[in-house]
C-alpha cells in the first residue's frame, strides 16, 4: 500500500461509522465518475465497479444492507476516498496515467472483497425482484 491509500484508509476509519458522512461521499464519487475521461480505460468494467461500490456504501449507510464485515466497508470507503482525491500517488491531472493508480487501487480492493460484493449483488438482485409494499 502507498502512503496515500494508507491516509485514505485512516480517513475511512473516521467516517465509516457515520452514515451521513458516508452518504456525503457519494455525490463526490458521482462527480468524479462524470468528470473522468473514460475513453482511455476499459470503461464498462472499471466504471461498473465504482457504481457497485457506491451502491454498497449507500445501502450500508442507509441501514438497508449490513451483512458486510467492517474491514470490507473500510477498504471500499478508502478506495472511493482515494479515487475522489485528486492528489494521490499519481496526480489525476497527468494525462493518460493520472488515474492509473486510482484504477489499480479500485481493482485491488474490488478483488480483495469480491466475495462480499457477490453477496451484496445477490442481495440487491433479490431486493429488486421483490414486489414493493406500495402496490
Image (spheres, helix red, strand yellow):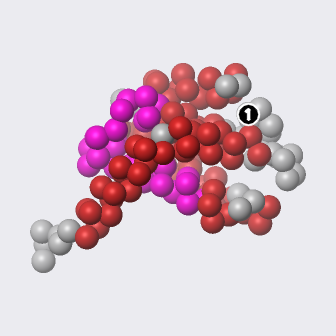
Front one among 13 and 113: 113
How crowded pointer 1 is (Cα within 10 Å; few <14, some 14-19, many 20+) is rated as many
Residue at 81%, 45% in the rendered image? 98
Residue denoted by label 1: 88
Q: Is residue 50 left or right of residue 89?
A: left
Which quadrant of the figure contains the C terminus? bottom left
Residue at 75%, 47% in the rendered image? 99
Front one among 14 and 1: 1
Residue at 80%, 39% in the rendered image? 91
- Magenta span has 57? yes
Picture coordinates of residue 66, whole percent (x, y): 28, 40
The segment highlighted magenta reads 47-74
In this view, the residue farthest toward the right is 95
Residue 117 sits above or below residue 21 on the image = below
Picture coordinates of residue 1, whole percent (x, y): 67, 25
Picture coordinates of residue 10, whole percent (x, y): 54, 22
Front one among 34 and 5: 5
Q: Secondary structure at mark 1?
A: loop
Q: Is residue 52 left or right of residue 84?
A: left
Is any atom of residue 28 visible in this view? yes
Residue at 75%, 59% in the rendered image? 41
- Magenta span has 15? no
Classify residue 79 by image quadrant: top right
Main SS of the magenta part reads helix
Amino acid at each position: 500500500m502507498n502512503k496515500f491509500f494508507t491516509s485514505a484508509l485512516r480517513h475511512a476509519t473516521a467516517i465509516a461509522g457515520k452514515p451521513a458522512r458516508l452518504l456525503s461521499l457519494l455525490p463526490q464519487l458521482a462527480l468524479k465518475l462524470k468528470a473522468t475521461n473514460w475513453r482511455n480505460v476499459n470503461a464498462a468494467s472499471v466504471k461498473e465497479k465504482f457504481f457497485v461500490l457506491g451502491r454498497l456504501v449507500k445501502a450500508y449507510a442507509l441501514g438497508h444492507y449490513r451483512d458486510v464485515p467492517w474491514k470490507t466497508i473500510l477498504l471500499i470507503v478508502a478506495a472511493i476516498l482515494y479515487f475522489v482525491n485528486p492528489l494521490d500517488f499519481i496526480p489525476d491531472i497527468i494525462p493518460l496515467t493520472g488515474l492509473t493508480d486510482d484504477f489499480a487501487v479500485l481493482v485491488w480492493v474490488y478483488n480483495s472483497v469480491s466475495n462480499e460484493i457477490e453477496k451484496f449483488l445477490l442481495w440487491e438482485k433479490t431486493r429488486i425482484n421483490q414486489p414493493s409494499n406500495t402496490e
